[in-house]
Image (spheres, grey):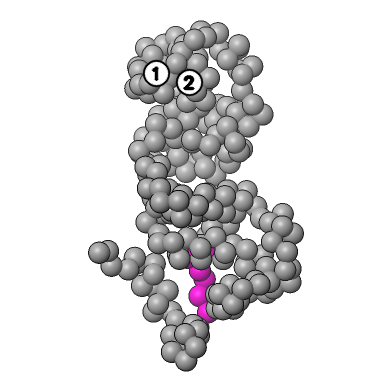
């Protein structure tokens, strides 16, 4: 049987359990499971390590930060313990438009994982084992900060090159250079090359992919 996670231990240390009624009275306010979930995308590794209750808290603290007035006792007690909680809106559908791109994506992914857990499904493999640098570059615009963060890594230039070319690879581009062909082989069954003309492959991209290819091109010095 697994012991409590480090985050759960931190939560318990930050709380004073009041036995009467079983309510949680916070000795001091706390910043939540992920205080920075409005500034970055949470990773698969982080979410996969959480228990069901922790996933619930990680999702609902985002709503709480944007002023949701919770309707359940559980939600009310949880939100009142968060630093800076300022409720003003009882309708979650009106709170959600206040989310930025990070919060929207994080809530979506946490909700999906919660549903999978309830259905008895095992957590998916960590993103670290993914073939792709940005598995979701077809669903959102990448940011300059993300690309700069890649470049700051020891193999940053190579990772930027891969991030740009993985978009082409996912659309079946038949690479022309030895480096490109070696990269395509490394993708195994995930790659199905059928078009040697980069211009025609580009026409298959959606708006996010076109934007991201151009953004990555600015930073890719290996072209």
Please, is residue 81 above or below residue 97 in the view?
below
Identify the element where label 2 is drawn: helix
Q: Residue at x 74, y 71 (%)?
A: 88
**Bounds of the magenta segment:** 28-35
**Mark 1 to mark 2 CA distance (whole Å):** 7 Å
Tag 1: Cα neighbours inside 10 Å, few (<14), some, or many (≥20)?
Answer: many
Q: Dot 2 corresponds to which residue? A: 169
Residue 34 falls within the magenta-colored stretch? yes
Say which quarter of the image contains residue 62.
bottom right
View extreme (front): residue = 119
Q: Main secondary structure of the magenta part?
A: loop
Tag 2: Cα neighbours inside 10 Å, few (<14), some, or many (≥20)?
Answer: many
CB within 8 Å, label 1 to label 2: yes
Please, is residue 168 above or below residue 63 in the view?
above
Question: Can residue 218 be seen in the rendering of this structure?
Answer: no
Question: Can residue 172 be seen in the rendering of this structure?
Answer: yes
Q: Residue at x 40, y 62 (%)?
A: 51
* Residue 166 in picture, x, y percent from top left: 47, 25
Q: Residue at x 60, y 12 (%)?
A: 199
Please, is residue 204 above or below residue 19 in the view?
above
- 187 vs 37, left or right, is left
* Residue 37 in picture, x, y percent from top left: 54, 57
Q: Residue at x 67, y 68 (%)?
A: 68
Identify the element where label 1 is drawn: helix
Question: Tag 2 or tag 1, which sits nearer the N-term?
Answer: 2
Q: Dot 1 corresponds to which residue? A: 184
Of residues 119 and 127, the one nearer the viewer is 119
Q: Quadrant of the N terminus?
A: bottom left
Please, is residue 136 above or below residue 213 in the view?
below
View extreme (bottom): residue = 20
* Residue 162 in picture, x, y percent from top left: 44, 27
Q: Which mark is residue 19?
A: none
């Amino acid at each position: 049987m697994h012991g409590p996670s480090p985050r759960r231990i931190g939560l318990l240390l930050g709380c004073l359990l009041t036995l009467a009624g079983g309510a949680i009275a916070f000795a001091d306010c706390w910043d939540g499971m992920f205080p920075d979930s409005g500034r970055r995308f949470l990773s698969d590794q982080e979410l996969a390590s959480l228990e069901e209750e922790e996933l619930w808290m990680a999702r609902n603290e985002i709503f709480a930060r944007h002023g949701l007035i919770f309707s359940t006792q559980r939600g009310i007690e949880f939100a009142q313990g968060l630093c800076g909680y300022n409720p003003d809106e009882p309708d979650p559908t009106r709170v959600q438009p206040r989310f930025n791109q990070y919060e929207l994506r994080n809530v979506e992914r946490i909700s999906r994982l919660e549903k999978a857990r309830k259905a008895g499904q095992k957590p998916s493999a960590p993103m670290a084992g993914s073939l792709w640098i940005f598995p979701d570059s077809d669903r959102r615009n990448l940011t300059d900060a993300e690309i700069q963060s890649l470049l700051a890594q020891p193999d940053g230039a190579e990772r930027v090159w891969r991030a740009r070319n993985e978009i082409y690879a996912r659309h079946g581009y038949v690479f022309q250079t030895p480096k490109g062909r070696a990269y395509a082989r490394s993708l195994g069954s995930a790659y199905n090359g059928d078009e040697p003309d980069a211009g025609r492959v580009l026409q298959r991209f959606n708006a996010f992919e076109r934007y991201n290819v151009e953004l990555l091109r600015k930073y890719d010095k290996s072209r």
